[in-house]
Amino acid sequence: MNAAGSILAPDEGTPFAIEQADASGPFVIICEHASRTLPRAVGDLGLSADALQSHIAWDPGALAVAKLLSARFDSPLIFQRFSRLVYDCNRPPEAPGAMPETSEIYRIPGNEKLSQAERDARTNALYIPFHKAISDIIDGRAARGLPTSIMTMHSFTPVYFGKAREVEIGILHDDDTRLADAMLAAAGPRAPYAVRRNEPYGPADGVTHSLQLHGISRGLANVMIEIRNDLIKDNAGQEVVARYMSELIATAVGEAPTARKTSVNARDT
């Protein structure tokens, strides 16, 4: 830990990055698990190189798809620059999963028996600045009179605890189902992918924190997208899935209820 008490050294930069901050498109796109980078202060957390390359450290392909959707919808994108193994920014500080001691089959020695001071240092360095930046973007858009919907972008492993997952794209929601309902209706029974509601995770798994914090609390339409990571492991797959998602999103919002509807105009879909 550096002299200022932060887990990030000055040359490691900010905990988040923003692209198209001033874009006027309809969404704020969030990618909490964009990176597998660890701050130098935490070393390797006692994990092997293979573990640190795996899905437990990040969401492979999620940032690439988020960038494509950001461009196609002319919308701001904010993403976390450090691994969720240090702090999972889709969890509140009090949640055990915020600084997990285990992830799937992996034990994470560097997260065991953290003191409150160590937990606070991670929270202050990674979680608080990340979510403040998101709030600032939303506030700025409100001041400009721009309607906003919240979209979080994730990927998931095809095999979890030895069990294959058939779902390919998950459309997740909490109490506000507006965007999810519309997207699932737009996908329909003949979708080219296995599209499911609240799979492979749902609200009971604690995965909707960002939706609650930035969408539900403000009355903004919101949705979480999960894509099986074998579909987006390379540029070609990322382009194909992003194209499908952009078409699905544009169609879905066009069919959304008008009472609390967020206006969306897709670009380059």
Image: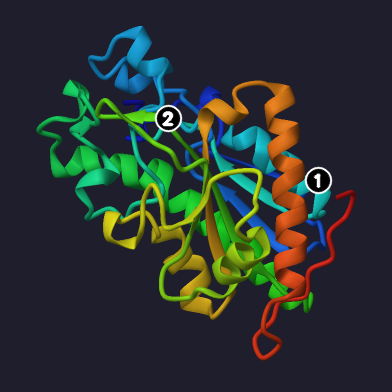
Crowd tier of the residue under label 1, counting other residues whose Cα lies within 10 Å: few below 14, some 14–19, many 20 or above: some
Q: Which residue is mark 1?
A: 71
Q: Does 250 sit left or right of 191 as displayed? A: right
Classify residue 31 by image quadrant. Answer: top right
- Mark closer to the observer (1, 2): 2
Left or right, 5 with respect to 260, comes to left
Left or right of 10: which side holds 89?
A: left
The quadrant in which residue 181 appears is bottom right
Within 10 Å of the Cα at label 2, are there few (<14), some (14-19), or many (20+) other Cα atoms?
some
Residue at horizontal 81%, vertical 45%? 71
Residue type at the position of mark 2: Pro
Q: Position of residue 132 (x, y in %)?
A: 51, 58
Q: Position of residue 212 (x, y in %)?
A: 43, 68
Classify residue 186 by image quadrant. bottom right
Mark toward the start of the polypeptide (1 vs 2):
1
Q: Which residue is mark 2?
A: 158
Task: Report x, y in % for residue 82.
Answer: 46, 31
Measure the alpha-carbon separation of dots 1 and 2: 27 Å
Instruction: Relative to 188, say whether 106 is above or below.
Output: above
Residue 60 seen in the figure: no
Q: Is residue 212 above or below residue 59?
A: below
